[in-house]
Image (tube, rainbow, N blue to C red):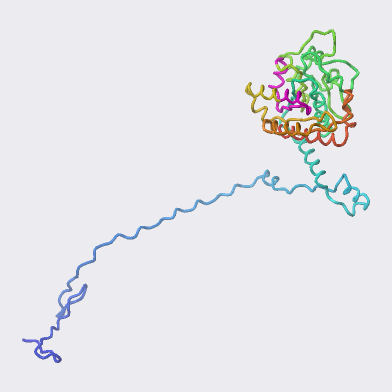
């Protein structure tokens, strides 16, 4: 049976069978003929973000709580016009300390810092008259005044030095030679007493330090060698927190070498003069040449003015030179109280001298 003609286009037979399509059902209820399936495609790559590790905060401890404390208040000024205002107003107006007083307080804090065991400070310059003995006494006095004692100034000259002559005398005339002879008395830790040392050292009163003099007997042939130094150093370190050691002028002496090897802090001292400063520079070269570079790098250099108006150009040269060699370079002024060469009285120094030596001592303490 023929298909009916298309009403619009006569003579053209219409195809009433719908075209097959993917998944379509053909006419006359025929079984669907599936069309071609599209080619499978790979899924787009997934960007996997790794999980962030959970940050675990450490459990705070007491040390953290203490470290987070605010700095204590500085308190009102104690010197200068600021302190005068506070006194005049009965404390109603109490200005805080100025820059100079704050600097002073910080230096005192450095000097008073806690130390991990006894410390040895060795003062050196192989030239006589370089200010070593004076520096030893004033470092010891500054430590003693601000730390409250347990400081020893020790003259480690192999024969005779002048530290004992520059100190306040004692009732006895015993020296390091006598202590060495009786050192066995202090070997027994349970029975040895610090008070027993009073028969060998010389108390310096309000300056709160002791002096151990070198041999003062002109007829004596006794000398201190490295073994003797080490024995005394080991014993004295049990009774003193800080030992300031004045050295002789012979760098080749075994006790000189032993003192340098025992040093926790080296102090290179020089007056602002060509001869003493050249000796100090030669000393630094010699120490570096013998493997003591670290000791020199951590050293403190002290430049003492020999007159009221020292050579400014030389001073600048020395600051440049030793500033590249050592950790700190500090100046101390000329002081009339030190000119005569007699016993050094800390209270007799000018305020400028005491302030300068406080800064020196603070720099030394920073290295301990």
Q: Residue at x 16, y 74 (%)?
A: 31
Whole-percent x, y for residue 286 in the image:
66, 21
Magenta stretch encompasses residue 316: no
- Vertical side of 331 occupied by 165: above or below: above
The question of residue 271 being in magenta is answered with yes
Quadrant containing the C terminus in the rendered view: top right
Please state if 137 lies on the left or on the right of 264 as rendered. right
Depicted 201 relative to depicted 25: above or below = above
Q: Position of residue 215 (x, y in %)?
A: 82, 14
Residue at the outermost left position: 1
Q: Which quadrant holds residue 277? A: top right
Q: Quadrant of residue 300?
A: top right
Q: Position of residue 212 (x, y in %)?
A: 82, 20
Q: Is residue 7 above or below residue 78?
A: below
Q: Which residues are magenta?
A: 252-280
Give the left or right position of residue 28, taking residue 53 as reference. Answer: left
Q: Position of residue 180 (x, y in %)?
A: 78, 14
């Amino acid at each position: 049976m023929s298909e009916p003609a298309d009403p619009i286009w006569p003579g053209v037979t219409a195809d009433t069978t719908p075209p097959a399509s993917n998944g379509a059902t053909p006419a006359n209820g025929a079984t669907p003929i599936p069309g071609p399936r599209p080619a499978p495609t790979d899924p787009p790559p997934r960007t996997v973000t790794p999980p962030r590790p959970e940050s675990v905060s450490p459990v705070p401890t007491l040390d953290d709580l203490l470290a987070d404390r605010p700095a204590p208040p500085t308190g009102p000024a104690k010197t200068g016009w600021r302190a005068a205002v506070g006194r005049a107003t009965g404390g109603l107006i109490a200005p805080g300390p100025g820059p100079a007083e704050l600097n002073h307080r910080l230096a005192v804090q450095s000097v008073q810092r806690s130390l991990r065991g006894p410390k040895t400070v060795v003062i050196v310059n192989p030239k006589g008259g370089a200010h070593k003995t004076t520096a030893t006494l004033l470092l010891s006095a500054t430590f003693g005044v601000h730390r409250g004692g347990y400081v020893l100034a020790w003259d480690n000259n192999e024969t005779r030095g002048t530290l004992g002559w520059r100190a306040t005398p004692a009732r006895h005339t015993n020296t390091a030679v006598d202590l060495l002879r009786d050192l066995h008395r202090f070997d027994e830790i349970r029975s040895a007493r610090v008070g027993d040392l009073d028969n060998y050292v010389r108390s310096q009163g309000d300056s709160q330090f002791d002096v151990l003099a070198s041999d003062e007997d002109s007829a004596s042939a006794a000398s201190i060698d490295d073994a003797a130094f080490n024995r005394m150093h080991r014993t004295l370190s049990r009774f003193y927190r800080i030992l300031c050691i004045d050295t002789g002028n012979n760098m080749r002496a075994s006790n000189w070498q032993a003192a340098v090897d025992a040093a926790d802090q080296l102090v290179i001292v020089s007056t602002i003069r060509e001869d003493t400063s050249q000796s100090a520079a030669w000393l630094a070269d010699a120490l570096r040449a013998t493997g003591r570079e670290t000791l020199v790098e951590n050293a403190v250099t002290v430049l003492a003015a020999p007159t009221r108006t020292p050579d400014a150009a030389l001073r600048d040269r020395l600051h440049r030179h030793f500033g590249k060699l050592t950790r700190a370079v500090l100046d101390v002024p000329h002081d009339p109280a030190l000119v005569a060469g007699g016993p050094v009285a800390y209270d007799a120094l000018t305020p400028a001298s005491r302030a300068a030596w406080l800064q020196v001592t603070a720099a030394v303490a920073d290295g301990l």
